[in-house]
């Protein structure tokens, strides 16, 4: 299964509380912080909600282990 690298690119200041909570629940705390999450519908839905605040790229399983 593929993985997604999610990077926090834009501050959530000035956006609604639920968007701030979504960024936190993705595991993002500081700007330019990245996390690797599985590519599944629940994570995709969270990303869609805050797509204007994050950058997403697909990562191969070999890159995650290295």
Image: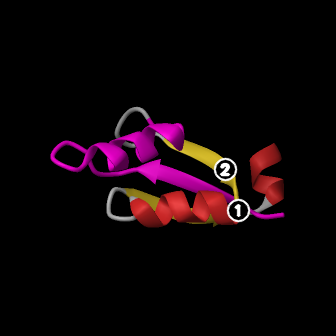
Residue at x 44%, y 46% (from the top left corner) = 22
Indicate left or right for 1 with 57 as reference: right
Kindly state the secondary structure of the residue where label 1 is placed: loop
Indicate left or right for 55 with 59 as reference: left
The answer, for residue 62, to whether it is visible in the render is: yes
Residue at x 52%, y 44% (from the top left corner) = 34
Kindly state the secondary structure of the residue where label 2 is placed: strand
List the residue tagged with mark 1.
39
Q: In this picture, which residue range is highlighted in magenta? A: 1-28
Are the residues tagged 1 and 2 within 8 Å (C-beta)?
yes
**64 and 2: which is toward the camera:** 2
| Marker count (numbered) | 2
Quadrant in the picture for residue 32: top left
Residue at x 47%, y 50% (from the top left corner) = 7
List the residue tagged with mark 2.
37
Quadrant in the picture for residue 13: top left
* Spot occupied by residue 45 in the image (x, y as percentages of width and height): 54, 64
**Disc 2 packing (10 Å; few <14; some 14–19; many ≥20):** some
* Spot occupied by residue 21 in the image (x, y as percentages of width and height): 40, 40
């Amino acid at each position: 299964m593929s993985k997604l690298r999610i990077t926090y690119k834009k501050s959530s200041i000035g956006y609604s509380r639920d968007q701030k909570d979504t960024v936190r629940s993705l595991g993002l705390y500081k700007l330019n912080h990245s996390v690797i999450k599985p590519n599944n519908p629940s994570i995709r839905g969270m990303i869609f909600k805050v797509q204007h605040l994050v950058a997403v790229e697909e990562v191969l399983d070999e890159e995650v282990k290295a």
